[in-house]
Image (cartoon, rainbow, N blue to C red):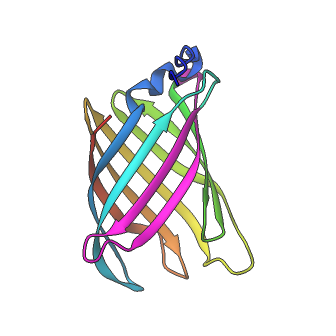
């Protein structure tokens, strides 16, 4: 069966078009409440012709390849370099982030975090992405479980498709 052609990219998300594709790489995590760790990661951005990019992310342990984390959501570009992101985590956390894109950098800060009754308490998140062609790096800071906002994750990913 032939694959259907992709719809045209919606003009509103053109500033985020550099993110489109599948990205793979490795990262490292740390936090005062856990042991430091290294992980593999795959991120995928795609579009369906609407004014958003869809996003899916998954990570796994480099030690034994067990699944670690995943999240899914949507990215929207708005006038003046504004970027809005909505993400859901299978651990019962939902985050809304807003920020700005300037050049190849996207800086996001959480404006809302919501948790189910059994989710760990996360009060703030900050993400910084740097896009340079087929190389995407990021750093994530988190305030959670009584700890102040601080570095948690950093990774380098490369476009594979």
| Outermost residue to the front | 1
Residues 92 and 108: in front is 92
**Residue at 60 percent of width and 78 percent of height:** 120
In this picture, residue 95 sits left or right of residue 41:
right
Q: Position of residue 73 (x, y in %)?
A: 59, 47
Residues 40 and 143: in front is 40
Let me know if residue 152 appears in the view: no
- Quadrant where the C terminus lies? top left
Q: Quadrant of residue 31?
A: bottom left
**Residue at 38 percent of width and 83 percent of height:** 32
**Residue at 46 percent of width and 53 percent of height:** 57
Answer above or below: position of 28 versus 102. Answer: below
**Residue at 34 percent of width and 57 percent of height:** 41
Report the predominant secondary structure element of the magenta stretch: strand
Q: Quadrant of residue 117?
A: bottom right
Let me know if residue 19 appears in the view: yes
In this picture, residue 160 sits left or right of residue 73:
left
Answer above or below: position of 21 versus 112. Answer: above
Q: Position of residue 144 (x, y in %)?
A: 53, 75
**Residue 81 colored magenta?**
no
Residues 37 and 112: in front is 37
**Residue 70 colored magenta?**
yes
- Magenta residues span 53-80
């Amino acid at each position: 069966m032939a694959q259907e052609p992709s719809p045209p990219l919606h003009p509103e998300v053109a500033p985020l078009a550099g993110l489109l594709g599948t990205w793979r790489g490795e990262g490292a995590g740390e936090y005062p409440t856990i042991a430091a760790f290294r992980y593999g990661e795959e991120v995928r951005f795609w579009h369906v012709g609407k004014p958003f990019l869809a996003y899916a992310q998954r990570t796994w342990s480099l030690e034994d390849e067990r699944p670690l984390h995943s999240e899914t959501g949507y990215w929207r570009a708005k006038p003046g370099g504004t970027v809005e992101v909505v993400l859901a985590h299978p651990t019962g956390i939902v985050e809304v982030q807003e920020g700005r894109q300037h050049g190849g950098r996207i800086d996001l800060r959480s404006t809302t975090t919501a948790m189910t009754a059994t989710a760990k308490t996360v009060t703030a998140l900050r993400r910084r992405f740097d896009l340079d062609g087929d190389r995407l790096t990021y750093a994530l800071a988190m305030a959670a479980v009584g700890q102040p906002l601080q570095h948690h994750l950093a990774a380098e990913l490369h476009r594979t498709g």
